[in-house]
Every structure is written in structure tokens, then in C-alpha cells.
Amino acid sequence: MVTKTIDKRINIKDLAKILNVSTATISRAFNNKPGVSQKLKKEILKKSKQLDYYPSSIARNFATTSTDTIGVVIPHRAESIFSDYFTPEVLSGIEDITNKIDYNLQIITSQKIIEEELSYIRILKEKKVDGLILMGLITGTKSFLKLEDSNLPYITIGKSTKNQKGSFVDLDHFKAAEIIVEHLVEQHKRKKIYLITGFSKFLCYENYINGYKSALMKYNLPFDNSQVKEGNTDEKDGYLLMKDFLDCGNIPDAVITSSDAMAIGAIEAINEKRLKVPEDIAVTGFCDFKLIAKYLQPPLTTIRQPNYEMGKLSAQTLINIIKGENQNLHQILLQPQLVIRHSCGCKQDTVK
């Protein structure tokens, strides 16, 4: 679990004290008034950028100087964002909204957003966008907490902190894990249910793990940490993590995963051991990417996540915030649906 540390947002008095100047000098430097040398002005602006300090007048400029552009921040390398099923569908939903109202869309990708804690406030200022949609956030980073304390327009897809102050669109991952375990236990009498999931430094997967544990406890099923393996939510890690279970002789009768891609990799590893899905091991996914899940052999039981709708909701909500049409807090928690196919042991397709 990632520990959250909340930084006090720096103000003009703090900056003046650090630089050993008066608050009036800081104000003159930002407003380009006489009485401040170019050298000192440069030093003030440099230090303010390092500390993510911007006067309230600059924050107000975001609302009054429109670029008709929103930015989507994805903290991964550009070549990796289309390797999953989630991101392209979300972007499609965002784009459909921006196209309807003639807004531009700027996709901002960089691994440095995570590695170097790049400031979201800096991104807003330097990329010249009216607001940000943030995806794939690690729980409670300093950069996000500073953005949360600002009055700048943003929305996240997926919560970044348990008590997030700002707007978000998310799926109830805790509930998703609960309903999968419930189905496997009540309908198929599975008792040795293991979990292959994304990294718990992301709040959605931490919630997924906690929902899984809660469901096991409800049915008095045993749990220890060896039943959970974390990795990237792609086919490769699904295969490798499932192979770890099987190579250790640690063979479950069911495995739930946090992506359809992971489920595909897990099924491949199971097949290599000449075990059968679902007869020996039931497998479930997460997303319901229809071009894959429905036509996999066996067809994949999975959680349906409304990726396209999440993109549309996030874009429309952010644009409303930017335009001042609705300044209320928007925290949208969507409910999961279990799409039942054959990989869990069922014979008929249903949605629950």
C-alpha cells in the first residue's frame, strides 16, 4: 500500500521567506511591475516554478483565456498506450464529446510523469490547455495532491486518493471482485480462488484486492499473500504470473484477473500444463473487450467496464467545469456487471 503524505500548498508568504524578499516584491515580479531587477525576477519565477507556486491571478487566467483544448494525461510511453483494451476505448469516448463541440484534444504521454513527478499544474500552464483528464494515476502522488489543492479544472478517470476532493469517474472495483468470487463460490463451488492483478500502487487494484479478500472472508475461505500476484495488466504478465502458480505446484481451482489480457495469458499457461479451463481451473477477466472476450476459447467470463462511457462522462464533465456551467463536485462511481460466459464453468451466456 502506498502511504499518502499531504504537502501544505505554498503561498506568497512562504515564497517570500524562502527568497528573503518581501511579498510586495514577489507580486511586482509576477505582474511585471518596476522595482525588481531582471536577475531577481528571473530567480523568483524559477523558484516559483520549482515549488509549483502560481498567484491566484494566473489560476484565474485559465478560466478567462480559453484555448478550446483539453489535455489527456497518460503516464506511460506513447507506444504502450494502445497495448491494452482500456485506453483506446476511453479515448474514443472523450474524442466523440470534443468533436461535437469543436474542442481540440491533446494527448500527453510520458513515463516521466511518474518517474520524475512532473507537475500537473505545470502541464496545464505549459501545454496551453483549458483542463486535464488524468488517467492511470498512482495513489496519492505529491503532484496530484498539489493539483487537488488548486482551483484548476481537472477530472480523473479512476480515483487517485481514497478521499479524493475533486471530480472523478470510476468503476467500483471492490464490488467487482466481490461479485466474481460470489459467482464462483455459489454457482461452481470453487474454494481455492487466486488473484492475478495490476499493481496495488494504483488505487483501483488496491480496491480490487480488498474486494477479493472481503469476499473470501464472507465465505470463510482461506487467504494468504501467496494467493495474490501483481504485475502489468497485459497478456505477457498474465501468462508469467499464472505460470508461477502452476510451477510451484500451487494449483487453484479458479483464478480471477484484473484484465481480459491477463486472463488470456493465464489460459495459455494453463493449457501448456495440459489442464483444462474451466474443468480444472475457472478463469475470469476484467473489461469485456468484445472482439476478444466473446470469441476466446472458451468464451471469457468477465467484468464489463464501460470504458467508452467513462471517456464520454469525463470529457463532458470537465467541459462543463471549464465553462462554469456546473461547478458542483462530480464523483461518479459506476457499478460493475458480470458477463457470464463459459470460462467460469457456465453453459449459457448471461449478464448479471
Image (cartoon, rainbow, N blue to C red):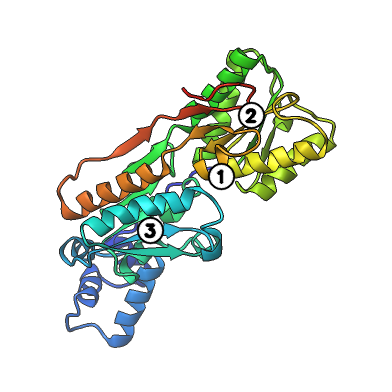
Q: Earlier in the sequence, mark 2 or mark 3?
A: 3
Q: In the rendered image of this protein, does residue 87 appear above or below residue 274?
A: below
Asked which quadrant contains residue 150, the reply is bottom left
Mark 2 near mark 3, Cβ–Cβ under 8 Å? no
Q: Which residue is mark 1?
A: 201
Which x, y percent locates residue 124? 33, 64
Q: In the rendered image of this protein, does residue 166 appear above or below residue 102?
A: above
Label 3 element class? strand
Q: Which residue is mark 2?
A: 343
Asked which quadrant contains residue 257, the reply is top right
Residue 63 lies left or right of residue 226; in this view the side is left
State the separation of the CA atoms marked 2 and 3.
35 Å
Q: Is residue 166 visible?
A: no
Q: 72 or 160, which is in the foreground?
A: 72
Label 1 element class? loop
Given the image, on which type of amino acid does mark 3 rest?
Val
Which residue ends up furthest to the bottom in the rendered image?
38
State the separation of the CA atoms marked 1 and 3.
21 Å
Given the image, on which type of amino acid does mark 1 rest?
Lys
State the separation of the CA atoms marked 1 and 2.
29 Å
Q: Residue at x 60, y 14 (%)?
A: 187
The mark closer to the camera, 2 or 3, is: 2
Q: 313 or 85, which is in the foreground?
A: 85
Few, some or many residues within 10 Å of mark 1 (<14, 14–19, 20+): some
Q: Residue at x 69, y 23 (%)?
A: 223
Given the image, on which type of amino acid does mark 2 rest?
Ser
The mark closer to the camera, 1 or 2, is: 2
Q: Which residue is mark 3?
A: 72
Q: In the rendered image of this protein, does residue 207 appear above or below residue 54?
A: above
Which x, y percent locates residue 210? 56, 29
